[in-house]
Every structure is written in C-alpha cells, then in structure tokens.
Amino acid sequence: MRILVIGSGGREHALVQALARSPHADALYAAPGNPGTAQHATNVGIASDDFDGLVEFARTEDIDLTIVGPEQPLVEGIVDRFTEEGLRIIGPKAAAARLEGSKAFADQFMERHGIPTADFRVFDADEYDEASSYLEEVGAPIVVKADGLAAGKGAFVCNTLEEAHQALDEIVDDRAFGAAGDQVVIEEKMEGEEVSIFALTDGSHYVLLSPSQDHKPIGEGGTGPNTGGMGAFSPAPIVDGPLLTRICREIVEPTLQGMEDEGTPYTGVLYCGLMITKEGPKVVEYNCRLGDPEAQVVLPLVESDLVEVFDRLADGALETGSLRASSGAAACVVLASEGYPIDYDTGVEITGIDDAESLPEVSVLHAGTRLRPDGVLVTDGGRVLGVTALGTDLPQALDRAYEGVEAVHFDGKTFRTDIGEKGVRHLSEA
C-alpha cells in the first residue's frame, strides 16, 4: 500500500515510524515531513495547507491512503476535498472537525447530548463588557479560552480574577490569536487529573489506543505558561478497567452517536482530553487528530498492524475492540529551545542523536529540526525533539528516556525532569 502522511512534527514522525513497521507499507511519503520522517519515508515538499498540491500528488503517485496529522487542514476541510476527488483519506470532515475547531461548538454539542463537561458560557468578541461582568460574577479560579484554533496556547487557567481579566484582554482586545478570538468561552475550572484518550473510529465502530497523560506547562510541577506538550507517558495508571469502561459509555460512544445524529458522522482519530474528577470523567476538550507528544508514546505500544487498522477504518469496516497493545510502557521527554514557548532562537546545532538511539529501546523523534545545506542538523522550532523509550513498566521507560535525553546536546536544551512522576506515584499507591 502506498501511504501519504501529511504534517511535519513529532506526531508525524511517530506515525511514519509506526506505519513503517507494517509489511503492507510498500511506499511511505511525508508532506512536508522533517529530517526524522526521512528515515522511513520520502519527504515531499508540499505544505499541509496546499490542498491542490496534495491532491495532485496523491493522484500522480497513486496514493492508496492519506493520513492527516495536524488539526488545521482537517478543520479547513482537507478530508472533504480528498473525498470529493475520490481519494481515500483518514480524518473527520470539516463539519465534524468543529469539535476541535470551535470550543463553543464543542461545549454546546456536549450540552445537547448530555456528555459530562465543565459549566460554561460563550461570549462574542463584541460582548466584552458582558464577559467581564460574568467573570466578576463567578469569580476565580476560572478558565478563559479563545474559541478557535490557537496552537494549543489559547486556553488560560486563571487562579485569580486579575489573571482572568488579563486573559480576556489578550484574547479580545489584543487579538493575540486573531480570528480564533472572535468568541470567548469561559468555563468552570475542573479539579482532578488530566488524561488523554484516543479512539480510532469509522463513525460507528472504534478501537482505543492506550490511555496517556501529557505535561502541558513548561515548568517543573506544572508551572509556567502552557506549551504544545513537554512530555507524555502511556499507559496512564489512573485509568483502570472500570474507569475506561465508564469513559467509553459516558463520553466516547455518546460523542460518536451524537455526531451521527446531527448528520456529521465522525471518522478518523477522536481525541478526548479528560479531567478525572471526584464526580467521574469529564471532557476538557476534543481534538480531531492524534496529540503531540501523546502520539509518540501511544503508537509504539500498538502491536496490531496499523496499516491494516487504518485500511479497515477508511473502508468503514473497523471492528470495535480489535486493537492489540503491548503490556509494557512508553515515555517521551520533549527537548525544547531555550525561551520556549515565548521567544527562542533557531539554527542551533544538534548532536548526540545516534548515541541516544544506540541505547536500549530509545528513539528520538524530530519535531522542530532541519538540515543545513552542509548536512548539519539544527533546531528549527520551539519543541525540537521527543526522546521516547519503551520499558517493561513505566519506571524503566522513564529511566531509559532520561538516559537518552542526556545523550542529546544543543545549546539551550530545555526539558522537564518530572515527566511521568504522577504515573509512578499512582503505581506506588496501587
């Protein structure tokens, strides 16, 4: 099978790496890809928002299946376009991708279908005074979100009213996120522990990837500004069998049924970002694709042939529960540029990747890298690399990942030293 993966980050490197394990992957392409995807696939210089170029490439190269990594092209309708052209593609159509593309739509959808989430109110940008008054009415802590896509940085968890008003100003007055701030969602701050649940679905049937946990803030102990993700681990010990069953019955299945009932069946990857509260699991957010860096830990644990799984998904022939997962664990530590997520330099030379990958069960996934004309690998983004390791259990996977971190070098290398600690704590308390 000839497969095209769209995107250029760590998630796409993880996807290409996982697909390459299948004997059915006759040819792999990544558009535009990165130096890491080039180890397993042929990189194609077509941007993920160049729908004409991607369609033409899929036609010319007889691509059997296209898999979309990032959210932007999904929200903008790339699946609609490929489907209209008679090309097979994995992902939700634009109407279904609104679950990620609009936080207001997602909250209102959950309200319509009785899916547990936070209490919320939605305000248009020209209702600034009403939104500000509502903040005074409900008080802090509170969550203030830009409605649209904001690269994972449009949600503010505010512990004081001053922080909440600053977030509102940044979204509405400063237009920090552009059109994504045309509406503002103000939500109750839920207490608990966050978990990422990924379902691969053909609209009617679904299979689950291993539960995982991400680490959004830049600083140790979950401090500092939010990022795209500084590390992840899987499986998440907090999610035992009974809780996972409850998540499926109360969240995953009602979401899929609700989308079908509204005439916008959901296919592809459904990400449910959950808060495990005292009352039970509640939805923090939906994403319409694999998470990053969660993909780097959930995909290596899949023992089923992913090409076969995606092929059945595209044909609407997925069998619920038919995914085999490893009994081990995986951990990923993200290496970022100094100053990320605010200001940072690029073009810094990277060394030591081969040394890291010579270690047992360690792989280094590229997120923000590029090759200079002289062939030297340099940084090219805020999140640069994801050092991923497998182990028989979570402590071993974490030890191996951090050993790999020490082997990689670039000036200003920034990372968290506490990835996975909450998972290890749950294991010790079990």
Image (tube, rainbow, N blue to C red):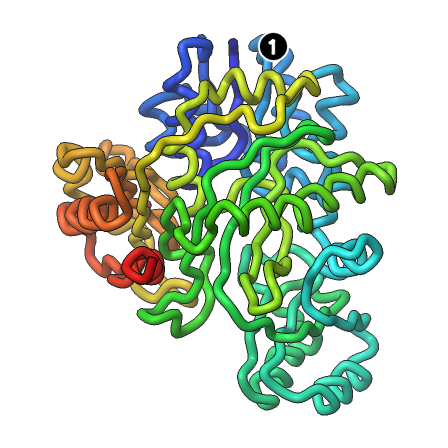
Rendered-image quadrant of the C terminus: bottom left
Q: Which residue is mark 1?
A: 60
Task: State whether residue 416 appears in this view.
Answer: yes
Determine the residue positioned at 65% across, 80% down: 169
Number of marks present in the image shown: 1
What x and y, as percent, mark residue 79?
70, 30
Horizontal side, residue 216 vs residue 288: left or right: left
Q: Is the residue 279 above or below the residue 103 in the image?
A: below
What amino acid is at disc 1?
Thr
Q: Residues within 10 Å of mark 1 (few under 14, many from 20)?
A: few
Query: Which quadrant holds residue 345?
Result: bottom left
What x and y, as percent, mark residue 143?
62, 74
What x and y, as percent, mark residue 95?
79, 41
Q: Is the residue 293 above or below the residue 186 in the image?
A: above
Q: Nearer the viewer, residue 103 or 52?
A: 103
Determine the residue positioned at 68% across, 16% down: 315
Determine the residue positioned at 55% across, 55% down: 151
Q: Secondary structure at mark 1?
A: helix
Task: State whether residue 385 appears in this view.
Answer: no
Q: Is the residue 388 above or below the residue 374 in the image?
A: below
What x and y, as percent, mark residue 307?
50, 18
